[in-house]
Every structure is written in C-alpha cells, then in structure tokens.
Image (cartoon, grey):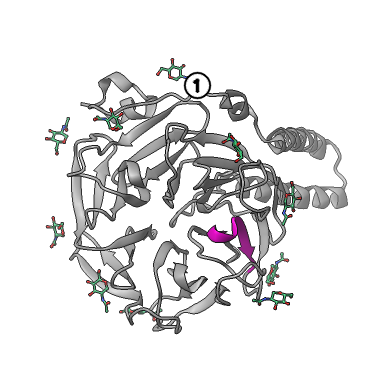
Amino acid sequence: MATLEDISNIEIDNKPPAPVQNINKPSVNRWNISCEHFRYKRCILVLICIILITIIITVPTVLVHKRRRTTTSTTTTTATAITATATGATIRTTTEVPLYFTNTTKWKQNGITIFSQDDYDEFRFDLNPMYMDNNEAIYLGEISKHRVIKIKLNAMNFSIVADANDTDHLRAPTDIIVDKKTDSIIICDQGLRQIIRWSRKNVTHRDIMISEINCNGLAMDDKGSLYVSDWLKVNVSHWELGVNNKSFVVAGGNGNGNNFEQLNQPHFLFVDKDYSLYVVDKSNHRVMKWEKNATKGIVVAGGNRAGTNLTQLSSPSGIVVDHLGNIYVTDTNNHRVMRWIHGAREGSIVVGGNGTGNETNQLDSPSDLVFDKHGNLYVFDTVNQRIQKFCIESN
Ligand SMILES: *[C@@H]1O[C@H](CO)[C@@H](O)[C@H](O)[C@H]1NC(C)=O
Ligand SMILES: *[C@@H]1O[C@H](CO)[C@@H](O)[C@H](O)[C@H]1NC(C)=O
Ligand SMILES: *[C@@H]1O[C@H](CO)[C@@H](O)[C@H](O)[C@H]1NC(C)=O
Ligand SMILES: *[C@@H]1O[C@H](CO)[C@@H](O)[C@H](O)[C@H]1NC(C)=O
Ligand SMILES: *[C@@H]1O[C@H](CO)[C@@H](O)[C@H](O)[C@H]1NC(C)=O
Ligand SMILES: *[C@@H]1O[C@H](CO)[C@@H](O)[C@H](O)[C@H]1NC(C)=O
Ligand SMILES: *[C@@H]1O[C@H](CO)[C@@H](O)[C@H](O)[C@H]1NC(C)=O
Ligand SMILES: *[C@@H]1O[C@H](CO)[C@@H](O)[C@H](O)[C@H]1NC(C)=O
Ligand SMILES: *[C@@H]1O[C@H](CO)[C@@H](O)[C@H](O)[C@H]1NC(C)=O
Ligand SMILES: CC(=O)N[C@H]1CO[C@H](CO)[C@@H](O)[C@@H]1O
C-alpha cells in the first residue's frame, strides 16, 4: 500500500497502478529559473539581521536614552515585517494568499512554463482547477483525464495522486482542495455528481462526502465547512459534514438570471475569514460577494456584460481574494488575469491581455490561479496546456 511518504517522495513503484510521468522536456532550465526577487529579498533579510545584531550589541554599550528609543521602534517594525512574511500563508480558505500584497503589487509580464501537458495530441478546453499545497506542490485536476496530479515545485517530477482511469471512482475533477486536518484531497467530481474525499495516506481509501450534486466549484472555510457551487440548481450550498450533514443554500437558488439574488453558471468559489463567499458567476461575467446570511449578492467585479474593457470580464473562472479584499480573477475569454481593488469600478491587468498565443506574455483561456508564499502567481493556461509562473516584481 502506498503511504503518504511514498506519495510525497514520488516512490512510483510502491503505488497502485498509477502512471507517473517525468517531464524531461526542455523546460528543465526554465524550471530552475528562480525569481530574482528571492535573492534580493534574501539579501535584504541578511542585511536586516546584520543591522539588528549590530544594534543589539551596540545598544547596551551606548546608553543614550533617546537613541535607545529610536532603536526600539526600528526593531519593532522590522520584527513585524518578518512575522508578516513568515506567517504569510497561514490563513487558509479556498487557497493560500500572502498577507503582504498591496494595492499596487506587480508581477513580471513574462511567464515561465513550469509544467506542460505535452502528451495531449488533440485540442482540449478543460478549465482545470489548481490548488497550492504548503507552497511545495500544486495539485492540478485534469478534467478530461479523470485524475488529479501533484506537481512538486522544486523538481521536474510530478506524480499522479488520484488516478482514475477506473472511472467508477473519479470522472471529471472540476475542483480540488487539500484538507490538512484529515490529510486528504477533496474533489468535486462533476462526472459522478459527487464530492469525494481521497486519502493521501492510502490512495485506495475514498469516501463519498456529498452525492447527487452537480458541482462546479468547492471551497472550505476555517471551520471545515464546505461550500459547493451547483451549476444545474444554480446555487451554492454550505455543508457542515460529520456533525449533522446539514446543508443550506448560501448563494443563488433563485433560478438562472442576472438579478442580485441570482446566478448563471456559478463556478469557482472563495471564502474569506469573515465567511463572505465570493462566487465567480461565469455566464453573468461578474464576481458576486455574498456576505454571511445575505439574501442577495453584491457585484464586486465585472457585471457589465462580456467585453474587453477594464470594467468588463468575459467568462471569468478562477478567483483569489487577498486580505485587503482585492480580487484576483482569471478573465478567461479575455486571456488575462485581472485585479479589482476593493470597491473599485474597474479592474487592472495583472498579466496577459496580449491576445491569444503561446508567447511568454500571453495566455490562452486561463482557468485557475494560485499564489505561493512568496507571492508568485501560477496560472493554468488552458489552451496552451501549461502552468505559467509569473514572478512577483514589486510590492
Ligand atoms: C490510464 O490511461 C492512460 C492513457 O489512456 C494510460 O497511458 C495509462 O497506462 C492508464 N493507467 C492505468 C493505470 O490504466
Ligand atoms: C487600497 O485601495 C482601497 C480602495 O481604494 C483603499 O481604501 C485603501 O486605502 C488602499 N490601500 C492603500 C494602502 O493604499
Ligand atoms: C525525478 O525522479 C527520478 C526517479 O523517480 C529521480 O531519479 C530524479 O532524481 C528526480 N528528479 C528530481 C529533479 O527530483
Ligand atoms: C486502504 O484503504 C482500503 C479501502 O478503504 C482498505 O481496504 C485498506 O485496508 C487500507 N489500507 C491500509 C494500509 O490502511
Ligand atoms: C453524513 O454523511 C456521510 C456520507 O453520506 C455518512 O457516512 C454519515 O453517516 C452521515 N452522518 C450523519 C450524522 O448523518
Ligand atoms: C441548492 O442545491 C442543493 C444541492 O444541489 C439542492 O439540494 C437544493 O435543492 C438547491 N436549492 C435550491 C433552492 O435551489
Ligand atoms: C446567520 O444565521 C445564523 C443562523 O442561520 C445565525 O446563528 C447567525 O447569528 C447569523 N449571523 C449573522 C452575522 O447574522
Ligand atoms: C469601452 O470603453 C470605451 C472607452 O472608454 C467606450 O467608448 C466603450 O463604449 C466601452 N464599451 C463598452 C461595451 O462599455
Ligand atoms: C506556439 O505557437 C506557434 C504558432 O501557433 C506554433 O508554431 C508553435 O509550435 C507553438 N509553440 C509551442 C511550444 O507550442
Ligand atoms: C495589454 C498589454 O499590452 N499587456 C502587456 C503585454 O506584454 C507586455 C510585456 O511583454 C506588457 O508590458 C504589457 O503591459
């Protein structure tokens, strides 16, 4: 039996029949390109440490009251900054978001391909979902391959965590979450109309958590409650599993439409620390925010029909919301990633927006997005069948 150790070390031989592939393609060099800011940041950290040590050594000897006060304030500020960086990715809702993003954080416009699905020989348009796990690996749901693969961020290898050529167990994973408490992957299995929990310790151990649901997207809050978007019922339901299996509608549920209490193709979801739910309302080309217990949503991005203006989105899919309430959304049919500052009437382009194509500054129908703890952005670039990494440039 495969254990967690096996999976995380990618010990292929000990796993049940799961094809593991190594990508030995030219991307080896690209993979090893680290973002320059890392080195820069590290240098700054080292400098700060040196300064701190110097200060600590100097302060007791120089007993000038005023100077000591200045030193104290410097130390406090630095310590806060370091803490913020260290705890950057601890608040976990749908995905991990660094806490130090500002209204003007920028990313390099040219992406690095860290993974590509070279083995496909036909055109596919799967809005594959991603999940960032502990900044060490990205889980990618491959919808038409009926499986979830784990891509390690520091190596060229990737492993298939939940293989499902056996379509009795997994068919079309449209969204994924890693649940650390139970050490499992929770998969929205649209093909089999269920939410399943797949153990990472024992890959043959699976539980059906919710059945008969036409799930599109998934989110989990810090209490472990699940939120599931249902494209057919056009609602998002909230589930407290294990306790009483109680569920209730938290968004939509009023049929297809574009009123504030309606949705049209609810897709990916995000829950923030106040339990506000962000729903990518795909066919309304907008993002809705449903505050806890709200009976209708608020348009927080798009909502001006499909189009390419900065006030518009066109069939958006992926979403991440940072601690400022700024929204990052993949504007799929505009081939770009947008940021909508909290309360803004229009968005700004984060990356892409240079037409369709496979150049490094282009995207072609991006589906999902995730960030690592350094703030680097990863986008699943659907038609190009690759994951692009965009290094953070400035904060
Ligand atoms: C799953 O399907 C792929 C492609 O059809 C094949 O290469 C692979 O060997 C299959 N794996 C298993 C375990 O059957
Ligand atoms: C970021 O933008 C929001 C909305 O415009 C504003 O309220 C906030 O003060 C800005 N934050 C900073 C640090 O500029
Ligand atoms: C990839 O995996 C192979 C065997 O599974 C191993 O020999 C190799 O060192 C791994 N490469 C990296 C970069 O981890
Ligand atoms: C793994 O899970 C399967 C199915 O639940 C079970 O039959 C098997 O005993 C488990 N193996 C281990 C080592 O726990
Ligand atoms: C909740 O649902 C799960 C899966 O259907 C089931 O195994 C469990 O017994 C249920 N628990 C309660 C309290 O109904
Ligand atoms: C909302 O979705 C759930 C799960 O699919 C379903 O059971 C329920 O009937 C729906 N409710 C409404 C009001 O649409
Ligand atoms: C939301 O509703 C629940 C019961 O449905 C209630 O216990 C809770 O206090 C409400 N929260 C707010 C913020 O109104
Ligand atoms: C897009 O913006 C331009 C310039 O601001 C404006 O002329 C045009 O009407 C806008 N289009 C739509 C569909 O809003
Ligand atoms: C990029 O697109 C061009 C034009 O469509 C094509 O010729 C080329 O093979 C593509 N490159 C890759 C790496 O797919
Ligand atoms: C809209 C637009 O032109 N976006 C970007 C295209 O790519 C270059 C870099 O190659 C960026 O500078 C643009 O902002």
**Residue 388 in the image: x percent, y percent?**
57, 42
Front residue of 374 and 60: 374
- The vertical placement of 217 against 256, above or below, is above
To which residue does mark 1 refer?
A: 24
In the displayed structure image, the side of residue 134 where residue 229 appears, left or right: left
- The vertical placement of 315 against 389, above or below, is below
Q: Residue 269, located in which quarter of the rendered image? A: bottom left
Mark 1 Cβ inside 8 Å of ligand 3: no
- Tell me the quadrant of the picture where the N terminus can be found: top left
In the displayed structure image, the side of residue 259 where residue 243 appears, left or right: left
**Residue 313 in the image: x percent, y percent?**
57, 67
Q: Residue at x 37, y 50 (%)?
A: 177
**Residue 102 in the image: x percent, y percent?**
68, 58
Q: Residue 243, located in which quarter of the rendered image? A: bottom left
Residue 72 lies in the magenta stretch: no
Q: Residue at x 25, y 39 (%)?
A: 164
Residue 332 lies in the magenta stretch: yes
**Residue 222 in the image: x percent, y percent?**
39, 58
Q: Callout 1: 10 Å neighbours few (<14), some, many (20+)?
A: few
* Residues in magenta, as a range: 330-341
Front residue of 238 and 284: 284
Front residue of 395 and 347: 347
Q: Amino acid at mark 1?
A: Asn
Residue 179: in sight, yes or no?
no
Dividing the image into four equal quarters, which quarter contains ligand 9?
Answer: top right
